Amino acid sequence: MPDVDAALDQLRRLAERPPRDPGPVEQVAERARRLRWRRRTRLGVGTLVVVFLVSLGGVVWANARSDEPPAVVAGPAYDKTTPPAGPGTEQDPGDASPPDAPRPRTSSQAERQLQAISDGIMPDLRGGDLNTLGDGTGVLFDLQDVIGQQRTVNVANDAPEGTVVEQDPLPGTPLDEVTAWTLTVSAGGPVVRYVDLPNDVAAFAARLPGFDPAEPLVARTTEFGAVYKTDRWLFGLTCAAVDRAYRTFADARYETACPGRIDEA
């Protein structure tokens, strides 16, 4: 079988032939294959690094959160001497202040006041500033939404002007039993009596509509002369003093009066 032998001999010669060097096409294809492999390797390693960092950050955050103390939600606190509140009312065991003493405001006082309104009981507003209770924290607005009827009385008092010194009803009263409420607000000091006024000031005060000689007055001094405040009136013997005092420490609730001018609201 000469043909078979010749074919086998040719195959042996081909097998013994040294390998041919790759041509330009093969070289380019090999470089492209290696480049694709490197890119895939880098992408895989980068993905693993990102996943590891995210997992590590989550573990660190969870450990930090577990070390924080549990949050404490302060409930409403009220004077023990006030009338019993409705069901669910909480009182502060350490609060033993007299019922008529203004209470200092704390950072959480507004939260307790709003919580009391939400629980349907009268909050403790004593010791608070009237403007802060209104525009500052909105406590008065929430209370007006529930009750509606509000009355503010200004009295001469040694507490800073605008401080709530009394309230009716007292803290802890169920709001469903309240139809109106009154805040007594300090008009500031020092306090003087009608009998202690100079004669000309006393004579002018007696002409003011609704003036009560038994009512205490608050005296203030300006560069234009002395002025006096009652629950209703801001008056003095010089209009310049009254106008300056009105701009400095009074507001729209006061009616002003000086010789030759009595402004009734």
Image (cartoon, rainbow, N blue to C red):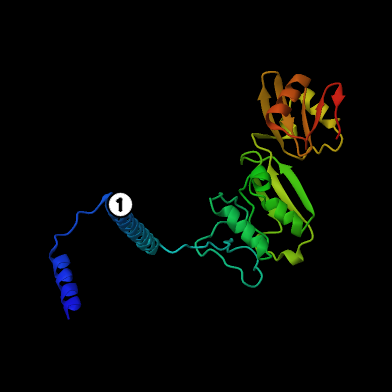
According to the image, label 1 marks what residue? Answer: 25
Q: At 67% from the left edge and 50% from the top edge, which residue is drawn?
A: 138
Horizontal arrangement in the rendering, residue 80 relative to residue 237 (left or right): left
Number of marks in picture: 1
Name, please, the residue furthest toward the front: 2
Q: Residues within 10 Å of mark 1 (few under 14, many from 20)?
A: few
Residue 16 visible in the displayed image: yes
Helix, strand or loop at mark 1: helix
| Residue drawn where x is 64% and y is 57% of the image | 114
Q: Quadrant of the C terminus?
A: top right
> Which residue is the extreme one toward the bottom?
1
Q: Nearer the viewer, residue 161 or 53?
A: 53
Quadrant where the N terminus is found in the figure: bottom left
How far across and down, in percent of the image, does residue 3 sit? 20, 76
Residue type at the position of mark 1: Val
The front one of 166 and 63 is: 63
Percent coordinates x, y for residue 246 in the rendering: 73, 28
For the question of whether residue 238 can be seen, the reply is no
Placement of 102 over or under 74, stated as above or below = above
Residue drawn at x 76%, y 66% as measured from the top left: 177
Which x, y percent locates residue 195? Answer: 74, 32
Image: 45 above or below 206: below
Q: Quadrant of residue 43?
A: bottom left
Q: Quadrant of residue 85?
A: bottom right
- On the image, the x and y values in percent for residue 21 come to 20, 54
User: Viewed as shown, does residue 14 lie left or right of 42?
Assistant: left
Which residue is more in the foreground, 253 or 50? 50
